[in-house]
């Protein structure tokens, strides 16, 4: 019983730990927005789209166009230095175009 509770807690926490995923460029102007391609999957089989990511950082000299598929990493700590976020979608960095 306790093993199941611990397992459920771990799975819930890991579901919000983001390291790397492919995203599609939704718009470039007036602000850069990207949408994660994979969907969030729940234990009951339900899926849900991740939210759009607004103004992710990107490496210099990466030309982007609408509908490009990009490789995105998520910072270990909050990039803006505010709060205690870890591996959060708001701390996205575009590494390149796929």
Image (cartoon, grey):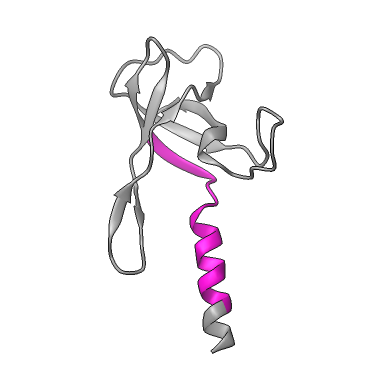
Q: Nearer the viewer, residue 53 or 19?
A: 53
Residue 83 location (% of width, % of height): 69, 38
Residue 20 location (% of width, % of height): 50, 42
Q: Is residue 6 above or below residue 2?
A: above
Question: Does the magenta run of residues contain 11?
Answer: yes
Quarter placement of the C terminus: top left
At 71% from the left edge and 30% from the top edge, which residue is drawn? 81
Disc tally is 0
Q: Is residue 40 above or below residue 45?
A: above
Question: Does the magenta run of residues contain 17?
Answer: yes
At 58% from the left edge and 77% from the top edge, which residue is drawn? 6
Q: Quadrant of residue 46?
A: bottom left
Q: Is residue 53 above or below residue 16?
A: above
Relative placement, left or right, of 60 versus 65 is right
Residue 65 location (% of width, % of height): 33, 15
- Region rendered in magenta: 6-23
At 59% from the left edge and 44% from the top edge, which residue is drawn? 87
At 39% from the left edge and 10% from the top edge, which residue is drawn? 30
Residue 63 location (% of width, % of height): 42, 12
């Amino acid at each position: 019983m306790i093993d199941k509770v611990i397992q459920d807690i771990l799975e819930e926490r890991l579901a919000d730990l983001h390291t790397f995923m492919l995203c599609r460029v939704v718009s470039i102007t007036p602000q850069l927005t990207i949408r994660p391609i994979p969907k969030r999957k729940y234990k009951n089989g339900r899926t849900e789209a991740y939210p759009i990511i607004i103004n992710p950082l990107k490496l210099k000299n990466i030309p982007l166009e609408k509908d490009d598929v990009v490789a995105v990493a998520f910072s270990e700590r909050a990039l803006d230095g505010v709060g205690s976020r870890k591996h959060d979608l708001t701390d996205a960095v575009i590494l390149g175009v796929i």
